[in-house]
Image (spheres, rainbow, N blue to C red):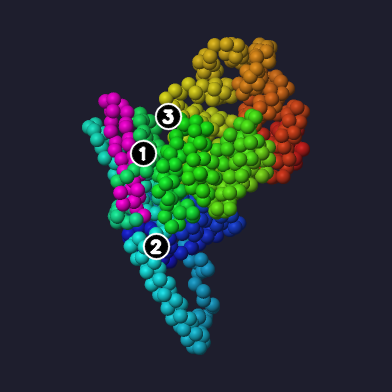
C-alpha cells in the first residue's frame, strides 16, 4: 500500500506529497489536479481532503464517520455536506476522462475504484526487470546509493531544524508572517424554542467554507492558542423570534488577542427558508474570508495595518449583501483600496464591479471599463498571481469579444479562488450568450449549488434550464428562488417566459395578470389567449400589438419573446437587435425556445454575423445548440457546423 501521509489525526494537505491516480496527477498542497491532457484544475480544500482519504484507503470502503473524522476534524456536519463533496468529485472524474470513480456502498460509505494511488515518478508496478536484476545490483552502485541517502537525510535534518526554529520564533511573535489562523466558536443560543443542534450546524457551515481557503488556517476541534498573535475568532448568537417563525443571528469577527470586533453582521431569516444554515454559514464565512484575505495580502507580510481595518471591514460586510446597491459597494471598495495602497485583492474586486457596470451599457460604460482596466494594471504590478484578476479582465472585455472573454473565463476557472463561485456563474452567462444552453445549465447549476442563496445565479440556472428545454428543472429552480425572496413577484417575468416556452398557458396567464396595468399587460393577455386557442390569424394579430407599444416596451425582452411566439420572425429579430444594442447582456434572447423560427431567417444570420457570433463559432469550434440535430438552420453551414 502506498502511504500518502495521512494519519488518524486528520488530513493536513500541506504534508502530503503529490501522487497519481491513473493518468491524473494530484497535488494536495496546491489544491490542483492535472489530467493527461496537461489541463490543470483547482479544487476546494475539502474536496481534496476527501479525495486523498479515499485514495489512501486503496479501494477499501470508508464510512461517513471515518471521512468526517479525517476531513472535518471531527466537527459534526450534515450528510448533505459530504454528499456535495462526493458529487463534485464525480464531476471532476468525468471532466478528467474517468481517471477514477467513487462507488457508494449503501448504508456504509464510499470507496474509490478504477485507479490506485502511486507516488509521482513511480508507476503502479515495481521497478524491477525480468529475472530480479535489481536484487543482484553492483555492490559499488549500492554503496553510492547509501552515501547519497545519508547526504539527503542530513540535508533534510538541517531543513527541519531551520523550519522548526522559524516556527518557534513566530510563535513568540518575533517574526510575524502573513499566515493567519481563524477559530470559529459554536454560536450561543439566546432564547427558548431553538431547533436542537442548529448552533453547531451553523458553526460547521462557517468552518466548512473557511477551510477551503489556502491563505489561512482554520482551527478544528482542538483549539489553537487563542493568545497566538495570528488567531482571529468568529463568534455569535442565535435567537428565535416571532414564536419561532424567524431567526435572528448575530456574528462578529474578533481581532487576535482581544475582544474587539472588526466586523459585525446582523441577519434576520425565516426558519422555513431552504438550506437555512448553509446560506447563513456562507454569508458569515464570506464576510470573514474577505477580511482575512485582505489581512493575508502580500503587502501585509509584516502584519496588517490597524488603520485599514475599518475601511476593509465596511467593504467586506457590504460585498455579499445583495440589498446594497452596486454604487454603494463600489464606494466601499474604493475606500478599502485607498486604505490599502498595496492591496491587489480589493483592486481586482473593484474592477469586477466596474465590469458589471460597463456590461449594461449606457453613457458611462467606457469610463467604467477604462477605470477597471487601470485598477487591474495596478493589481498585476502588486501581485500578478491574484486569482480575481482573470475574472475582472473577462468582465471588462468588450461585450462582443467572445473569443477573448472565453479565454479569460477559462483562466479564471482554472485558478478559481475559494471565496465565491463567481467563475461558474459568469461562464454560465457567457455560454447562454453564445447559444450553448446545455452547458450553461450545467455551470449555472454548479454555481447555484455552491451558493444556494445567490439569487441571480439560481434564477439564471432556472432560465438556462428553460432555454435548454428542461422545463421541469426550470420550474424547480425558480420555485427555489421564490423561497428566498421576500417579494417573489420579482420572478413574474421569468415565470411568464417559462409558461410561454413550455406552453403552460395557465401559468403564463397568471403571471401576465400580475403585470402593471397598461398597454403591455393588455397585449400580453391577448397574445396568451390567442396562443391557448391556437388560431394563427389571432396569434399574429395579437403579436402585432407589441409593435404599437411605446418605447421602451416595444423593445423589451417581453416584446421580443411575444413577437417570436406570434411567428413575426423578422420583427422579432429587429426588436432583439435594438434590445441588444441598448443592453448587450440580453444576448441570450437569441437562443431561447421562442426564437427557433426566427433563427431560420436571413435577418438572424446578418445579425449574428454583425455581432461577431459566427466568427466565434468558427474560431472556437463550438457550435450553438440549435446547430445540433437533424433539422438545422442554413446559418449553421456558414461556419461548417451543420449536422
Q: Earlier in the sequence, mark 1 or mark 2?
A: 2
Residue at 49 percent across and 58 percent down: it is 30
Compared with 165, 370 (above or below) is: above
Q: Position of residue 457 (x, y in %)?
A: 51, 35
What's drawn in magenta, residue-wise? Answer: 230-258
Front residue of 593 and 333: 333
Q: Residues within 10 Å of mark 2 (few under 14, many from 20)?
A: some
Q: CA distance from mark 2 to mark 3?
A: 47 Å
Residue at 52 percent across and 33 percent down: it is 326
The residue identified by callout 3 is 484
Q: Is residue 451 visible?
A: no
Compared with 115, 620 (above or below) is: above
Q: Earlier in the sequence, mark 2 or mark 3?
A: 2
Front residue of 195 and 125: 195
In the orientation shown, which residue stands out farthest toward the bottom?
Answer: 140
The residue identified by callout 2 is 175
Q: Position of residue 210 (x, y in %)?
A: 40, 48
Q: Nearer the viewer, mark 2 or mark 3?
A: 2
Q: Along the horizontal axis of the image, is 21 left or right of 196?
A: right
The residue identified by callout 1 is 264
Q: Residues within 10 Å of mark 3 (few under 14, many from 20)?
A: many
Q: Position of residue 402 (x, y in %)?
A: 67, 40
In the orientation shown, which residue stands out farthest toward the front?
Answer: 307
Residue at 44 percent across and 76 percent down: it is 155
- Tag 3's secondary structure? helix
Residue at 34 percent across and 46 percent down: it is 254
Q: Position of residue 83 (x, y in %)?
A: 41, 45
In the orientation shown, which residue stands out farthest toward the left?
Answer: 192
Compared with 238, 348 (above or below) is: below
Q: Earlier in the sequence, mark 3 or mark 1?
A: 1
Q: Quadrant of the N terminus?
A: bottom left
Amino acid at each position: 500500500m502506498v502511504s500518502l501521509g495521512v494519519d488518524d489525526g486528520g488530513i493536513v494537505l500541506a504534508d502530503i506529497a503529490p501522487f497519481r491516480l491513473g493518468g491524473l496527477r494530484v497535488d494536495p498542497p496546491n489544491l490542483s489536479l492535472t489530467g493527461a491532457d496537461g489541463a490543470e484544475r483547482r479544487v476546494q480544500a475539502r474536496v481534496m481532503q476527501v479525495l486523498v482519504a479515499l485514495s489512501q484507503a486503496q479501494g477499501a470502503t470508508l464510512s461517513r464517520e471515518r471521512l468526517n473524522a479525517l476531513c472535518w476534524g471531527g466537527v459534526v456536519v450534515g450528510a448533505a455536506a459530504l454528499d456535495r463533496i462526493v458529487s463534485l468529485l464525480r464531476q471532476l472524474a468525468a471532466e478528467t476522462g474517468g481517471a477514477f470513480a467513487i462507488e457508494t456502498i449503501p448504508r456504509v460509505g464510499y470507496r474509490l475504484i478504477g485507479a490506485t494511488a502511486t507516488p509521482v515518478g513511480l508507476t503502479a508496478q515495481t521497478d524491477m526487470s525480468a529475472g530480479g536484476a535489481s536484487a543482484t545490483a553492483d555492490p559499488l552502485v549500492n554503496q553510492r546509493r547509501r552515501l547519497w541517502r545519508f547526504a539527503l537525510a542530513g540535508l533534510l535534518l538541517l531543513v527541519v531544524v531551520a523550519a522548526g526554529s522559524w516556527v518557534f520564533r513566530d510563535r513568540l511573535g518575533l517574526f510575524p508572517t502573513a499566515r493567519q489562523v481563524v477559530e470559529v466558536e459554536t454560536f450561543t443560543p439566546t432564547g427558548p424554542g431553538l431547533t436542537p443542534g442548529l448552533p453547531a450546524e451553523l458553526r460547521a457551515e462557517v468552518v466548512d467554507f473557511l477551510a477551503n481557503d489556502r491563505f489561512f488556517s482554520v482551527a478544528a476541534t482542538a483549539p489553537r492558542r487563542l493568545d497566538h498573535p495570528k488567531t482571529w475568532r468568529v463568534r455569535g448568537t442565535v435567537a428565535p423570534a416571532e414564536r419561532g417563525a424567524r431567526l435572528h443571528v448575530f456574528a462578529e469577527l474578533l481581532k487576535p488577542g482581544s475582544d474587539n470586533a472588526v466586523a459585525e453582521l446582523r441577519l434576520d431569516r425565516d426558519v422555513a427558508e431552504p438550506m437555512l444554515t448553509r446560506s447563513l454559514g456562507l454569508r458569515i464565512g464570506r464576510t470573514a474570508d474577505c477580511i482575512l484575505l485582505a489581512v493575508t495580502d502580500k503587502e501585509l507580510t509584516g502584519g496588517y495595518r490597524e488603520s485599514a481595518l475599518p475601511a476593509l471591514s465596511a467593504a467586506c460586510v457590504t460585498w455579499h449583501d445583495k440589498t446594497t446597491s452596486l454604487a454603494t459597494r463600489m464606494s466601499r471598495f474604493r475606500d478599502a483600496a485607498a486604505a490599502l495602497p498595496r492591496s491587489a485583492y480589493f483592486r481586482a474586486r473593484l474592477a469586477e464591479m466596474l465590469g458589471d457596470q460597463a456590461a449594461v451599457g449606457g453613457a458611462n460604460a467606457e469610463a467604467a471599463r477604462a477605470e477597471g482596466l487601470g485598477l487591474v494594471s495596478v493589481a498585476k504590478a502588486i501581485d500578478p498571481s491574484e486569482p480575481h484578476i482573470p475574472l475582472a479582465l473577462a468582465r471588462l472585455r468588450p461585450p462582443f469579444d467572445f473569443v477573448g472573454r472565453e479565454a479569460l473565463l477559462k483562466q479564471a476557472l482554472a485558478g478559481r479562488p475559494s471565496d465565491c463561485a463567481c467563475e461558474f456563474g459568469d461562464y454560465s452567462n457567457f455560454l447562454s450568450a453564445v447559444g450553448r444552453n446545455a452547458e450553461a445549465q450545467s455551470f449555472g447549476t454548479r454555481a447555484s449549488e455552491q451558493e444556494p442563496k445567490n439569487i441571480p445565479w439560481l434564477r439564471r440556472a432556472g432560465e438556462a434550464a428553460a432555454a435548454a428545454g428542461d422545463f421541469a428543472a426550470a420550474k424547480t429552480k425558480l420555485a427555489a428562488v421564490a423561497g428566498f425572496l421576500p417579494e417573489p413577484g420579482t420572478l413574474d417575468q421569468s415565470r411568464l417566459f417559462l409558461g410561454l416556452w413550455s406552453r403552460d398557458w395557465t401559468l403564463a396567464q397568471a403571471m401576465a395578470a400580475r403585470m402593471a396595468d397598461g398597454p403591455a399587460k393588455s397585449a400580453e393577455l391577448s397574445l396568451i389567449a390567442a396562443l391557448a386557442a391556437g388560431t394563427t390569424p389571432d396569434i399574429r394579430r395579437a403579436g402585432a400589438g407589441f409593435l404599437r407599444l411605446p418605447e421602451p416596451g416595444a423593445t423589451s425582452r417581453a416584446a421580443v419573446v411575444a413577437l417570436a411566439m406570434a411567428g413575426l420572425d423578422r420583427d422579432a429579430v429587429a426588436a432583439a437587435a435594438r434590445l441588444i444594442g441598448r443592453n448587450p447582456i440580453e444576448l441570450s434572447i437569441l437562443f431561447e425556445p421562442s426564437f427557433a423560427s426566427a433563427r431560420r431567417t436571413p435577418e438572424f444570420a446578418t445579425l449574428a454575423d454583425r455581432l461577431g457570433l459566427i466568427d466565434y463559432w468558427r474560431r472556437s469550434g463550438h457550435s450553438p445548440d440549435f446547430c445540433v440535430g437533424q433539422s438545422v438552420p442554413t446559418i449553421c453551414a456558414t461556419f461548417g457546423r451543420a449536422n
